[in-house]
Each structure stands twice: as structure tokens, then as C-alpha cells.
Amino acid sequence: MKIFSAQQMRMADEATMQSQKITSLELMEHAATKTFNFIHEKLQGAPIFIHVFCGIGNNGGDGLVISRLLIKHGYNVKSYIVNFSDNRSEEFLANYDRLKEIAKEWPIQLKSEEDFPAIQSNDMVIDAIFGIGLNRPLLPWVISLIKHINNSRSFTLSVDIPSGLYADKAPEDPKGVIFASVTVTFQVPKLIFFLPQTGIYTQDLEVIDIGLDRNYLQQQSGIAELISKNEILPLYRSRYKYSHKGTYGHCVIVGGSYGKIGSVVLATKSALRTGAGLVTAYVPECGYEVLQTAVPEAMVITDDDDELAEIKLDFEPSAVGIGIGLGTNEKTIKAFREFLKENTSQLVIDADGINIVSKHPELLDHLKENTIITPHPKELERLIGGWNDDFEKIEKTKSFSKQHRCIIVIKGANSIIVYGDQMYINNTGNPGMATAGSGDVLTGIITGLLSQGYDPLQATVFGVYLHGSSGDIAALQIGFEGLIASDIISHIGAAYLELFKAPAGSKEKSES
């Protein structure tokens, strides 16, 4: 599913009005009616008190339509106009008049903290104060209103985006943003729902189709792609009856040091579970017995030390995953440097491999094109430098990716894959995966996919999705707190099978 910028969404509205020969007011009515239908379906006429806070632009216009429809259907509604400016959109004014025609009480005007209504925790709030076009700091009393709504702890539904969020930067005041119980957004998700600094403001997200112009939506590339099962299925490569282990490649996992051999065990197991035909673990001597015992399916090559001082292979692997548990000993850094100079295989760099590159940036010149780098936030900071907000982080990552012709996975909730200007946002995974070794498993999964002949970008996108899906399936059985990295590995097979399951509630048609 594509993710559009605020400007692209405005252009989508224009394209829709032209192609369908409708006005902006009619489009607003349609979008707001869809939002009302969602609310009505959930409430089913429940006798709940609903506060609707409307701004004075088009997002406020949506709120006014929703208020009118709620009143028509017998709900107990009170509407408020948040007067943060003297300017009002034409669509807002038109819907304000329509609401006044049917409402017993006209909307209450809010101009200062003295006007704030009492909100009970068992009330419902509909937030339609600001939309995706917010481009200026909020007035202090408006920030106080948002805090007042948040402090009420009522169920809050935001229309399109939580008020106080910008489309392209973090908010100035983190507390000056609506914390939405659910956000009903129009047509496509927005980038802000998937970034750490801004995604926290939406507990649940609902994307509703408001009928925007299909030709425009298909022709525009968007600023990112949200990855779900529909995007992954076309990437899957099925196996053939007369294939053999050599068909699916021979990958190597390089890493480990005294006390950190477990990371290589995890990466090696996950590469095998992902489908690599042959996997060799290249570890220091202290890891030999551990690997041979823990992963009997794998082959093992060792260096004659407790730290890797040499990385020499007498064959050309189809893919290499390197860096997990590697350590940053001087002799290991030297071995890593020589390996990068000579390597011709598809490559995944993680953990200490990233840390070594960060301390010795000249090594970046030796990376094979389309090398995959998988940093967690601190490793990314060491690699590209600091950032002021998540939007700057993304731009710096894009610049780094273009300069060094590499693929970067920004690991975390909704891991982001960056390849030049292309950006893919993963939609699987859960908080239980914030556990030791989870990243090692991801390295093994991506390496295992590369081994089977997947293109580096496809292997990265597919691997990140598969990793998250495996964790989701495991968490359903044992919960977030009980989840460990080995559980992710043991559910990789189930994650493959999940790709081909029909959605819940759908019925298979059979022919007699």
C-alpha cells in the first residue's frame, strides 16, 4: 500500500474532483460520511455523550458533517469550534450552516481556557481540530485544550490524523498532540503513523476508502510503500520437485567471540529455517563445539583463536552475513577489512560489523554494491551521525544509502528499509521482539533469502516481513513478555504458511 505526502493527498483530492465532476464540499461530505459510518457501526446507537471538537479549516468541516450525522441518528452530541484564527474555509462555513439548521444547540465557540468543557472519562471525543495540512506552531491555549482532552482519558477518535501532528516534522511540544484511541485516516496511511516520534499518538489505525481517483493513486509512486502480505506474496519463490540443497545456495554466517557464540547460533539456525540449502558458520575456535552441538545441520569453520583474526573461505558462498557477536578487537578489525576487500558475495552486515565500519568509514569504499546493513537506532547513529527528529533521520539515511549504494534496515517497530530514495515500511512485528538476539535472527533470515537467489532488495523487504510475522505468530501463543529470539526462529515455517492463508472471515468457494 502506498504512502503519500500531504501535497500528494491534496493533488489526489483535486484529481478526484475533476474526474468525478464533484465539488470540494461534496468530497468532504463523502469522506465525513464514511467516517460517521465507521463510528455508527461501532457504537450502534449507544447512549454515550460525544464531544466533537472542530477546527476552522477542512478538517473542522469534516467534524461538522460528522456532528450533523450523529445528531440525525439520535446520538447525544455537543459540538465545539476551536477559534484559533479569523480565517475559515468555505467548506467549513457551508457545513457550519448545515449543522445550525438541525442542531438544537449551536456549536460552542472556544477562544480561551475559560471556555473548555468538562469531559468525563466515559465520554467520547471526536478530534477534528487540525488536519494533515498543519504548518505552524499551535497557540498556547490550543495546546492547553489538547492537554485537557488527553487528561480526560476519554475514548478519542481523530479524523485523518491526531491534531497537533505535522506531516513532515516532529511536534514542538510532545504533549501538544492528541493521543488518539483510534485514528480514522482517509484512503492511504500517512508516514507519521509509522515513526517512533509520531506513531505513539495513534493506538489503533483505520484506513477508509473515500473513493479518491484510482488513476491518480496508481500512477503516483508515493513517498513510501507499506509492506503487508499483499506486497510480499508476489516476491515468494516456490520450490520445485527436482531441486536439491545446492539449488538453494550455500551461505556463510561470520561472527562470534568468546561469550558471544549464541548470536551465531541464532543467525545460523534462522538461515536454515528460511530455506538456505547449505549454511556454514565461520567462528573462532571457542565456538566449534557450541555450533556443532546446537546446529547439527550446519557446517563449521573455525579460526585458531577466541577472536576472529582471519576470515578466509576456500569457496565462494552465495551470501554472507557478518558481524553478529564479532567483537571489535584490532586483529578482528584487520580481518574484517581484508574480507571486505576480497568479498564478491552478496553481503549482510550487522552488529559489530556496523560498529567497525562506523569507526573506520574508509571501509565503506570496499562494500559490494547493494550490501545490506541492519542497524538498531544506536548503530545507525554511529553510522550516519545524529538527527533532530525521525524525518531528518530518514533523509540522512537516504543520503548515506545513495552515497554508498547500499540497502539500510532501520530496525524497530515498523522497521524501515531505505534504498536510495525508495522507502519500505514493514507492518509486522510486536513489542515482544524487543529481546536479545532478535536482530541476529533477522540477519540469518535475510542471508538465507539471499542464498536462495532473491534480489538484495527483495530479500531485505521479504526478510523483514517474515521476521516480524514469525514474531507475531509466536507472540499469539506465548505473549510478549515470554517471547525470546529462538521462538522467532521456530515460527519461520509458520510465517511462510501464513502467506497463503485466506483472511479471517473469508469463505473458500468449492465446486461440486
Image (spheres, rainbow, N blue to C red):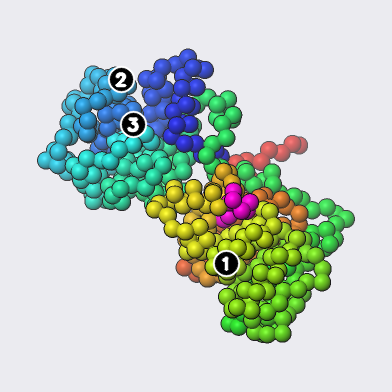
Q: Residue at x 82, y 72 (%)?
A: 314
Element type at mark 2: helix
Element type at mark 3: helix
Say which residue label 1 marks.
360
The image shows residue 301, relative to residue 495, as above or below, that is below
Q: Cα distance, mark 2 to mark 1? A: 58 Å
Say which residue label 3 marks.
59
Q: Residue at x 68, y 54 (%)?
A: 369
Q: Residue at x 22, y 30 (%)?
A: 85
| Residue 312 image position (x, y, % from top left) | 76, 73
Q: Are marks 1 and 3 in contact (CB under 8 Å)?
A: no
Give the residues in magenta: 401-409
Q: Cα distance, mark 2 to mark 3? A: 12 Å
Counting other residues with Cα less than 10 Å from the Cα at mark 2, is it few (<14), some (14-19), or many (20 or more)?
some
Quarter holding the N terminus is top right
Element type at mark 1: loop
Nearest to the eye among marks 2 and 1: give it.
Answer: 1
Q: Residue at x 38, y 36 (%)?
A: 132
| Residue 99 image position (x, y, % from top left) | 26, 23
Say which residue label 2 marks.
90
Q: Label 2 sits on what residue type?
A: Glu
**The one of 99 and 110 positioned closer to us in this rendering:** 110
The image shows residue 236, relative to residue 247, as above or below, that is above
N-term-proximal mark, 1 vs 3: 3
